[in-house]
Image (cartoon, rainbow, N blue to C red):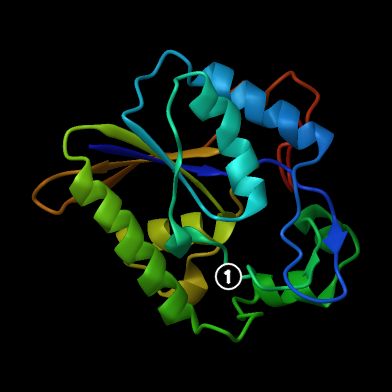
Amino acid sequence: MELLLIRHALPVRHIVEGGAADPPLSDAGRAQAQHLADYLAHEELHAIYTSPMRRAIETAEPLAAGRGIVAGIVDEVAEWDRNESEYVPMEELRAANDPRWQAMLRGEWLVHEETPEEFVGRLVGALEGIIAAHSGQRVAVVCHGGVIYGYLGHVLGLPVAQAFFYPNYTSIHRVAAARSGERSIVTINETSHLRRTGLPMGLFQEG
């Protein structure tokens, strides 16, 4: 089967007094999500799953609506910062040389509700469960940067601290999953749908 791991589109900066920030998409993010849906319109998807976080759900909406599919919510592919009261896009952290950005570059864990191993363990278990349920099919999972580099790092056999890279907004990461258990990474950071759109792509590129 083919597993498409898709990072959510650009959300807004969001800070709350208490509880989880869980931001919605920005106007640019909604445009990114539509370009993603248009790009994948001619590929058959047998199922779509999404993280329970708002930015992932809203990214999946145009992709699912164009196919008449109801996206399934998978709690275990939520991001590691799901309960944080502040969400600041990574570009802002980098531009300000924020200590949190520097810590991520050093491979340090920023949230202590889960260890890195616990985080990767839950997302790998969830994605392998999706793979097992969709033998011979193509399935999209709209999730988060940490989930994507956590799973791809697992496939490559990398320690958690060495698996960090930056998935662009609405980037597609394809994994071929064989019944034998073999996992092959087919593409990383597939974002041709954002090129020449003028929309932000991520830390290092613009469309």
Tell me the element at label 1: loop
Vertical order, 5 against 190 (above or below): below
Q: What residue sits 21% from the left and 46% below the top?
A: 133
Whether residue 99 sits left or right of residue 184 in the image: it is right
| Mark 1, residue position | 80
**Observer-nearest of 42 and 160:** 42
191 over 178 or under it: above or below: above
Q: Is residue 142 left or right of residue 132?
A: right
Splitting the image into 4 quarters, where does residue 107 fall? bottom right
Can I make out residue 78 in this image? yes
Judge by depth and name the residue closer to the eye, 32 or 157: 32
Identify which residue, 119 or 49, lies in the foreground.
49
Numbered disc total? 1
x 82%, y 33%: residue: 27
Residue 44 pos. (x, y %): 34, 20
Where residue 113 appears, x then y in whole percent?
A: 57, 84
